[in-house]
Image: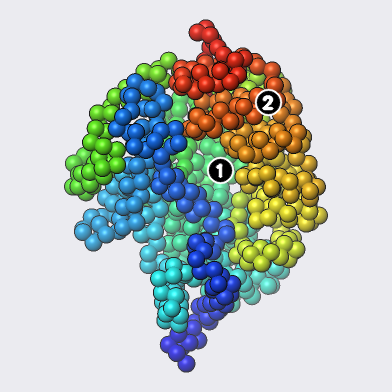
Amino acid sequence: MSRFGDNIKNNPVTWIFTVVALVLLALIILWFWPEREQSETTSDLSSKSDFLQSSDRNGLNNSHSDNIDSNSAVKIDTSDYAQCQQFTREFRSTSVGWGYENHKEWDRYLLQGYSLDEITLAIEHFANSNFAARFRVEQLRKGTEISLTNQQLNEQLRQQFPELAGSGLSIQRAIPLPALAAFATMTAEEKQQVLSAQPLGVDDVAYFIHSGLPDDDIMMMLSHISDPAAMVSYERLEATSLLDFAVAASRPVLVKSLLQSGLLPSSDDYLGSSMEWALSRLSYADENAIQNAVEVVKLLKLYGATARFRVKSQAKIEGNFPRNYFQFTEQQILSILQDYQLDLTQIEQRQVFVLPEQHPLITSLEAQRDAFLTKQLSGEYPVQLIACERTLKSVNAQWQPESAHDVINRIEKLYNGSPELVISKLADIDPLLVDMYRERLDRLARPMTIISFPPEASALLQKGDIKQTIRYFEAQSYSDEVKRWLIPQLLGFNVEYYSEVRQSSLWLDDLQLSDLMLLRLGAEQVQALEHAGANLRGMDSRNKTLMHYAAEQSDVSLVSFLRSQGYPFSLDDQGQDPLHIVLRSDQLKLSKQKIESLVDVVMDYQPDIDAFHHSRMALIKLKYPQLYQSLIIRHPVLAVTAETPLPQVR
């Protein structure tokens, strides 16, 4: 037997996953071999975060807007708001793009003697905190049991199939172990048997904590782990402690057990600490989750857990860590103190590592970045940037709206207990507020719980076997919150699965247009859904039509298709109509031509023009006079006067 065979013979767990992975790999190679010119695709259909990061990278690499030619950066009129907005956006994306390109090899600075803390903060300085956190957690996870297992598996793969060298293909140990996939439906005896037979690790437990497995089952798993303090490699969170997974899931029973077993609250110099994870969850907890979130904070406070605060006072608490944020108003601080006897202001501030201003790594890299920017944007860019920032500041000073969230919170406080009255008052201020408030209510009424998409189900969907996939999910004991999230995921693979999904026990009969539009529907998908029996021509639980969502996504082709097929414009007189949406200032990241096209289509419905349409046009006139002139030439009814007020909220 080869060395590969000897190794797997002595490690049955590795053998199981290696054989499965190699079989799948062989099938993939055989399936795609005649079309090797195809671009690479991701093998993990559940890796949503990687997809989003890939999208971000594509945005960085294609940062030049179609509003301004990329060569026009040296010719910009620094008194023109639109050109300055584009130039500063281009500067930032080019600068961050440079940081990302260097991110691929940031670990080389470890070999030059810089610490992980120094490199992490340098990445944040030149790119952003998301890239920095991802790099840091990858470095921290090197040497974990999972990492070493994956290295061994891939080395064996290269030895067995040397022709795959450089292909980019790799295999990984499954999380969770396949034998545990149906753990929730097993009898107590079966659970004990499978736990005794499997080499359970902290990553498997982290997966099940995140997916919502009951506390008793998690406690049973913890009793079979030799080292609960081992570093977690499961990638759902940028956290390496099992305690933080329990904290982030607001599971006080598990948090208490882990603390009592000897795990200490985390306090990494850059990643979120245990207390920061707890505060972020408390900050967004609804009435059903706040009790557990409070209990977690209290438990951590007993163990001296600390957090980074930007602001900490009786009037406001605010802080952030990579990809997460927490904020509490004066009312929330007081309410938590009175209702739960938890004083958030007594949580201690923690100190983190800070680079000195003239750090040699920063100084060296800034020189490299400046040379790159000069080449990309011209040598005049520093002067142009200063002038443009002055122009933007001057124009922005003329429009100082309230935060939409602050207005909603204020009105909701005044008329608490009467959503109809809140909506009525918000509609008087701006229909945007109505939409945001209804979305808030809908999320409370129809909560979703995100889980990791099981690899077994992904494999079935890759084969197009929706019936077997549905049977797999029906065999699990999923809550309505999980099912509500799961249905759009299944339709995301193929909207033609609508009929099968609707006839299954997974169906909750409350699928909304807002859920479907998460799939970025196009005209073909809309037609397929209607053909399968979906009702797409009414309002959803947020009083929105499909045209609303198409306008929000700035999808000219879909908007045009819906208009041509007679889909309704709007069936609500309090929230935004599609014209309000396309005239909103935050839509102006689009090209002038695209905005014109969107406005043309929605104006074809001949909507009644109200004060809120005009206020949006007044803002366009202030910031983008050329676009304004173009729109009123095409649609004179949209013209405004010098007295037309600007929108009250942002």
Relative depth, front residue between 209 and 634: 634
Q: Which mark is residue 622?
A: none
Q: Residue at x 29, y 32 (%)?
A: 74
Q: Quadrant of residue 537?
A: top right
Relative depth, front residue between 650 and 571: 571
Q: Residue at x 65, y 45 (%)?
A: 521
273 on left or right of 12: left
Question: Residue 94, position in %: x, y?
Answer: 34, 42
- Crowding near pointer 2: few (<14 within 10 Å), some, many (20+)? few
Question: Residue 183, position in %: x, y?
Answer: 65, 66
Residue 314: tell me if it is visible: no
Q: Is residue 142 above or below residue 14?
A: above
Relative depth, front residue between 135 and 546: 546
Q: Residue at x 43, y 15 (%)?
A: 398
Residue furthest out toward the front: 633
Q: Quadrant of residue 284?
A: top right
Name the residue that disc number 2 marks: 604
Q: Residue at x 71, y 45 (%)?
A: 526
- Crowding near pointer 1: few (<14 within 10 Å), some, many (20+)? many
Question: Residue 627, position in %: x, y?
Answer: 49, 23
Name the residue type under label 1.
Ala
Residue furthest out toward the bottom: 1
Residue 104: tell me if it is visible: yes
Mark 2 lies on a secondary structure that is loop
Name the residue type under label 2.
Asp
Mark 1 lies on a secondary structure that is helix
Q: Is residue 362 above or below residue 143?
A: above
Q: Which mark is residue 293?
A: 1
